[in-house]
Amino acid sequence: GDSVTQMEGPVTLSEEAFLTINCTYTATGYPSLFWYVQYPGEGLQLLLKATKADDKGSNKGFEATYRKETTSFHLEKGSVQVSDSAVYFCALITGNQFYFGTGTSLTVIP
Amino acid sequence: EAQVTQNPRYLITVTGKKLTVTCSQNMNHEYMSWYRQDPGLGLRQIYYSMNVEVTDKGDVPEGYKVSRKEKRNFPLILESPSPNQTSLYFCASRLNLQGHQFFGPGTRLTVL
């Protein structure tokens, strides 16, 4: 079945460090791919998305490229801030259903 | 303000006592879903609805019911809650099949 696998956390980085969170997927057809972010005590918010192969989603300095050949959608940011501390979820939609990864907790220390 | 609201935000109850968690969206979205979030398991879909009076099971529907009598509301019903339903629940809506989801703030449920 369709699924999303993302790197386990927690991840702890110093401010201004480079961030990569890996995400790979299994899906029939041509899914759309998403990254959501969950700040403490809140619901998930859309961070970025890509709807077809080679699309790059970007927002707030975060980027992810839809790689069909490697079935991946890795999240990157060149210089993280303390305010980026949150849980990040990779997700895909195929047909009527969304599938989420298990989430990666990121803590950025000053 | 476009939003998804859920009530209550926190609930402690006992095994077997029926409860309802309400969900409402003001964006005229077609699709609505319920998820539960558990440590190490991420978000798992309980039920979803594609329109009024159209609902379908997600990955973990056992022990839950839903209804969609109006477009804006999608309540989650636990007829006889059990401790394994202790979790963080999220309602979400989206405009169409490929649209991204808007999430509510979550309901933390504890079943003793």
Image (spheres, grey):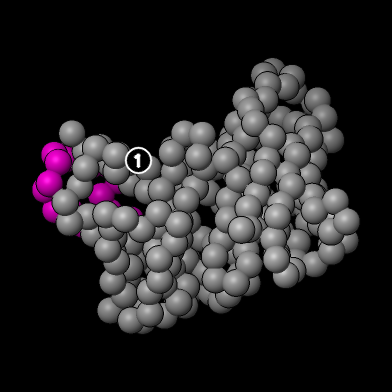
Q: Nearer the viewer, residue A71 or A110?
A: A71
Q: Which residues are magenta?
A: B5-21
Q: Nearer the viewer, residue A75 or A4?
A: A4
Q: Position of residue B13 (x, y in %)?
A: 16, 40
Residue at point 78%, 44% (across, down): A74
Classify 10 Å Cα crowding around label 1: few (below 14), some (14-19), many (20 and above): some
Residue at point 88%, 56% (across, down): A69
Q: Quadrant of residue B79?
A: bottom left
Q: Is residue A32 magenta?
A: no
Hey, which residue is sitting farthest front in the picture?
Answer: A1
Asked if B2 appears above or below B44 in the picture, the reply is: below
Asked if A12 appears above or below B1 in the picture, the reply is: above
Q: Is residue B20 magenta?
A: yes
In this rendering, position of residue B84 left or right of residue B99: left
Residue at point 54%, 71% (across, down): A96
Q: Position of residue A64 (x, y in %)?
A: 79, 50
Residue at point 47%, 66% (across, down): B93
Total count of labels = 1
Q: Position of residue B11 (x, y in %)?
A: 22, 42
Q: Quadrant of residue A81?
A: top right
Q: Secondary structure at mark 1?
A: strand
Whether residue B21 is visible, yes or no, is no
Q: Position of residue B83 (x, y in %)?
A: 24, 37
Q: Which residue is mark 1?
A: B87
Whether residue A23 is visible, yes or no, is yes
State which chain disc 1 sits on.
B
Residue type beneath disc 1:
Ser
> Where the C terminus of chain B falls, by quadrant?
top left
In this rendering, position of residue B56 left or right of residue B86: right
